[in-house]
Image (tube, helix red, strand yellow):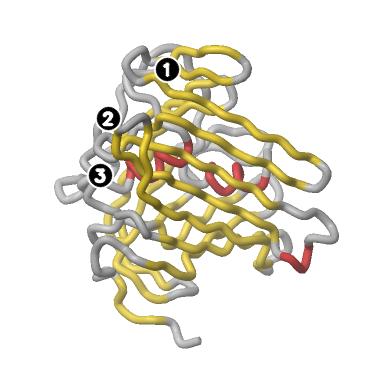
C-alpha cells in the first residue's frame, strides 16, 4: 500500500462489496470553506519511540466543473526529507466535488515513491451510479465518494444527538472496488496533542485484517468538538508497530477553533 494511501486509510478502511449501500449523501457543507489548509505529521513507532516519518496537508480551493460551482480538494503527502535517501515519497490525491452535495466529479492521484511513478483518474457519474477509470466502467452506490471527498463529507455530520456506539455509513470507490465504510461514535472527551489540548469527538472505524492492519475496532480518531470537525489525532496499531498522526497547523478555518483549550508550549 502506498505511503499516502496508508495515511488516508487511517480515516476510512473497509472491505470491498458489490452493489449499493446506505451512505451519507448530499451533505450540506457547514464545516469548511475555500482557502482552508490543515497540516499533519505522521509518526511511526516500532521500538517504543515515535519517529517523524512524513507530512501531509489538506487544502480546499474554489473550482468549476462544466459550469457548476465546485471545490478542488487536495491532499499532498511526502516522506521526511531525512529519509529521502532511503525511500523518497511525493504523493498527491485530488478530488473535484460539487459545491452543494460534496459528491465527486473527478478523482486523480499521482504516486511518486522511489522509482515507482503512476497517475490515475476516475470520473464519477452520480446519476448513473457509475465510476469510469482507465480499467473500465464500474457500478457505484446511490452516492459514491472517493477517499478525499469522503473525509470532507464526513466532517459535516451532526453529532449533537449521537449516542455512544452509533454508527455512520458511507461508500467510496478506489482501485476498481466499491467500499462501504462505517465509524462508531465513542463519545466526547479531551486530548492533548502536539499542537494543544482540545475538546474532541472520539470515533472508531472498523478495520478489516489485512497486510497493514490487525483488524477490529482498534483505531481511534479524535476530531474537534466544534463546527469544523477537523481530525487532530489518529492512532492505530499495525502489523509491525503503530502509527500516530497529529494535526500541527491550520489556516482559514470556516469557524473559530472553539474546541482548543490551550496551546502546547513550544
SS for dot 2 = loop
Distance (Cα) linking label 3 and label 2: 11 Å
The residue lying toward the viewer, choosing from 32 and 194, is 32
Residue 182 position in % (x across, y down): 38, 34
Q: What residue is at 41 percent from the left and 67 percent from the top? A: 250
Between discs 3 and 2, the one toward the N terminus? 2
The label on residue 157 is 3
* Mark 2 vs 1: CB contact within 8 A: no
Distance (Cα) linking label 1 and label 3: 22 Å
Whether residue 82 sits left or right of residue 91 in the image: it is right
- Please give the residue where the numbered disc 1 appears in the rendered image: 140
The residue lying toward the viewer, choosing from 42 and 238, is 42
Q: What residue is at 59 percent from the left and 25 percent from the top? A: 175
Whether residue 17 sits left or right of residue 2 in the image: it is left
Q: Is residue 173 above or below residue 157?
A: above
SS for dot 3 = loop
Location of the N terminus by quadrant is top right
Whether residue 72 sits left or right of residue 23 in the image: it is right
Q: Residue 264 falls in which quadrant of the image?
A: bottom left
The label on residue 25 is 2
SS for dot 1 = loop
Q: What residue is at 61 percent from the left and 41 percent from the top? A: 213
Task: Sort mark 2 into few (<14), some (14-19) or many (20+) by Cα contacts within 10 Å.
Answer: some
Amino acid at each position: 500500500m502506498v505511503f499516502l494511501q496508508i495515511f488516508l486509510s487511517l480515516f476510512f478502511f473497509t472491505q470491498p462489496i458489490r452493489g449499493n449501500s446506505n451512505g451519507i449523501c448530499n451533505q450540506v457543507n457547514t464545516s469548511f470553506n475555500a482557502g482552508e489548509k490543515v497540516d499533519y505529521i505522521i509518526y511511526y513507532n516500532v521500538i517504543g519511540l515515535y519517529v517523524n516519518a512524513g507530512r501531509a496537508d489538506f487544502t480546499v480551493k474554489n473550482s468549476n466543473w462544466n459550469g457548476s460551482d465546485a471545490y478542488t480538494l487536495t491532499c499532498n503527502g511526502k516522506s521526511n526529507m531525512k529519509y529521502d535517501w532511503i525511500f523518497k515519497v511525493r504523493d498527491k490525491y485530488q478530488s473535484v466535488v460539487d459545491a452543494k452535495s460534496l459528491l465527486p466529479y473527478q478523482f486523480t492521484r499521482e504516486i511518486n515513491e522511489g522509482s515507482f511513478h503512476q497517475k490515475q483518474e476516475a470520473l464519477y457519474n452520480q446519476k448513473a451510479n457509475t465510476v469510469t477509470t482507465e480499467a473500465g466502467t464500474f457500478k457505484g452506490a446511490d452516492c459514491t465518494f472517493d477517499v478525499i471527498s469522503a473525509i470532507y463529507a464526513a466532517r459535516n455530520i451532526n453529532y449533537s444527538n449521537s449516542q455512544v456506539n452509533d454508527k455512520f455509513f458511507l461508500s467510496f470507490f478506489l482501485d476498481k472496488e466499491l467500499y462501504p465504510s462505517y465509524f462508531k461514535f465513542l463519545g466526547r472527551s479531551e486530548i492533548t496533542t502536539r499542537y494543544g489540548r482540545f475538546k474532541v469527538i472520539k470515533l472508531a472505524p472498523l478495520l478489516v485484517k489485512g497486510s497493514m492492519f490487525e483488524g477490529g475496532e482498534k483505531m481511534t480518531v479524535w476530531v474537534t468538538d466544534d463546527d469544523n470537525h477537523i481530525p487532530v489525532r489518529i492512532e492505530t496499531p499495525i502489523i509491525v508497530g503503530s502509527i500516530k498522526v497529529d494535526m500541527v497547523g491550520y489556516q482559514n478555518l470556516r469557524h473559530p477553533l472553539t474546541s482548543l483549550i490551550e496551546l502546547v508550549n513550544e
